[in-house]
Image: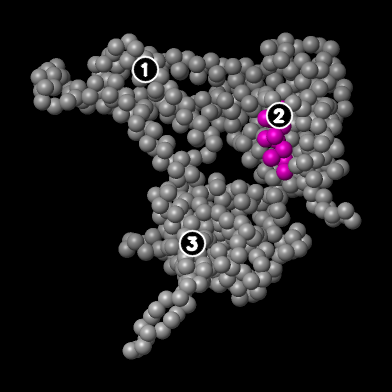
Amino acid sequence: MNIKRTKEEIKNTIEAYLKRDEYGSYEIPVIRQRPILLLGPPGIGKTQIMEQISRECKIALAAYSITHHTRQSAIGLPFISKKQYGNREYAVTEYTMSEIVASIYEKMEQTGLSEGILFLDEINCVSETLAPAMLQFLQCKSFGNHKIPEGWVIVAAGNPPEYNKSVREFDVVTMDRVKRMDVEADFEVWKEYAYRQGLHGAVISYLNARKQNFYQMETTVDGRNFATPRGWEDLSDFIQVYEKLGKTADREVVTQYIQFPKIAKDFANYLELYEKYQTDYQLEEIFQGRLDEILLKKIAHASFDERLSVLGLILSRVNEMLKKSVQHLAYMEQLHSCLLELKELTESDSGNGAGSFEAQRQSACNTEIPDGQQLLDNIYNKINADYIRLKAAELLGREADQQYQKVLRTMERFGQTLKLEGIREKHPAFLRMKELFALENEAYERQQQQSLETLEYAFDFLEGAFGTGQEMVMFITELNSNYYSVKFLESCDCERYYQYNQELLFDEKRRKLLERLS
């Protein structure tokens, strides 16, 4: 199965394992909660999805690469203790707590989460001395005498023997006690993830044209050549930072990540042309609504690779803008919830009528009533506490983390405005907050309009250069593959998108019907 289906299956398994009955016991007894064993080639995202799953399920994660452990660190060190058997005292060998089990308890203490995932990578590459302990772990969920705490789901991952010489085959007895999932690379699934993570447009458009280079593994006399999804993602991150530094990623840089010389050379050449086309086709002019007829004719008669590269540039700019809009909307929604909370606190503290308000004023000497600034500070402190708690529990992804920080900075700025303007009473403070929020909303609406204009300019260019040809079909298809463009278009009208999308759906249905008839 692909990594997307694997992630879904793991989440479903966790949900089933952690489901409790009316008496508080797990529906599936712990002894019957089989460890999940992921088997698949390296670099396809087995480790990465565990972080996503823990955040989405709101449970803790303790992750280890088991190849870094010895028998002593896994099961603990021996020590002599005294025990009474019958009427005699005996010296007995016991073991200190396993480092891995201890880390689970530490994680529970750090995060405040009692349930979680214990993820052990490269489970089938353990040393010969550690192998029996690993078999006991998979069968009994314990290291030595120390059991994994209840509420912790075990997930292990390993590579098939053809990818790693150190792999040890598990026997039938062990395999019959695990929930096995075989994972394989799938470009279309990875592309959805790549768009969501904002990978470099050159990487996505290159792999769109050369899907066979997405995952390659080759054995030669000089060793292994390989290109993996992990390599492409890490290379993308590096290229993006290089661009911010004003540096160029050449072939030498590419080969440091894509360790398949032929593919690395091909992508390096593609990247060079990709950057050149930004200038040649006057990308900035296109997104200002100024189209050059000569350039339109030039791209219309260019080679397929060149047209695909330019399409990739257009998509990259559009996706970047639509992503900003969707993230801006999420920020505005969180900020709006703060304003609503301030409104509720203002109204509840003020009472329902003048008499009630007067009564509160008269009792102010006896009961301290928070003013507008204090109410805003209370909301800020609550959001900040939530942020600290979620961050400590490692339940925030990068995007959510940045959104929290942005909201907190805005709330802090609002509070400073109240102090500078000397506004303390609740109602005037709330009205001033509404004004400041309205300014934020105006900025959001400008962002939305700019994003819509960017999309319209892209359609202008594509229609002028390619009409309704395959490039337009590819453009619509890619928009439908991108989480952010789909979210944007759900709430923002773009007539040409809906028109072309309907035509694409109609053509797809017609093609499938003809296939069935034939």
Disc 3 is placed on an element classified as helix
At 58% across and 59% down in the image, what residue appears?
A: 120
Query: Does the magenta segment cover residue 241?
Result: yes
Residue pointed to by mark 1: 416
Q: Which of the two labelled residues, at mark 1 and mark 2, occupies the earlier sequence position?
A: 2
At 61% across and 36% down in the image, what residue appears?
A: 196
Counting other residues with Cα less than 10 Å from the Cα at mark 3, is it few (<14), some (14-19), or many (20 or more)? many
> In the displayed structure, would residue 191 be above or below residue 226?
above
For the stretch drawn in magenta, the main secondary structure is: helix
Specify start and end residues of the magenta stretch as a single range.
231-243
Q: 125 or 310: which is nearer to us?
A: 125
Q: 331 or 492: which is nearer to us?
A: 331
Disc 1 is placed on an element classified as helix
Q: Amino acid at mark 3?
A: Val
Q: Position of residue 423 (x, y in %)?
A: 28, 13
Q: Position of residue 289 (x, y in %)?
A: 69, 12
Q: Horizontally, is 403 left or right of 509 in the view?
A: left
Q: How far is the residue under mark 1 from the one under mark 2?
A: 37 Å
Q: Quadrant of residue 267?
A: top right
Q: Quadrant of residue 467?
A: top right
Q: Quadrant of residue 283?
A: top right
Q: Is residue 15 visible?
A: no
Residue 242 marker: 2
Q: Horizontally, is 202 left or right of 127 in the view?
A: right
> In the displayed structure, would residue 490 be above or below residue 441?
below
Residue pointed to by mark 3: 101
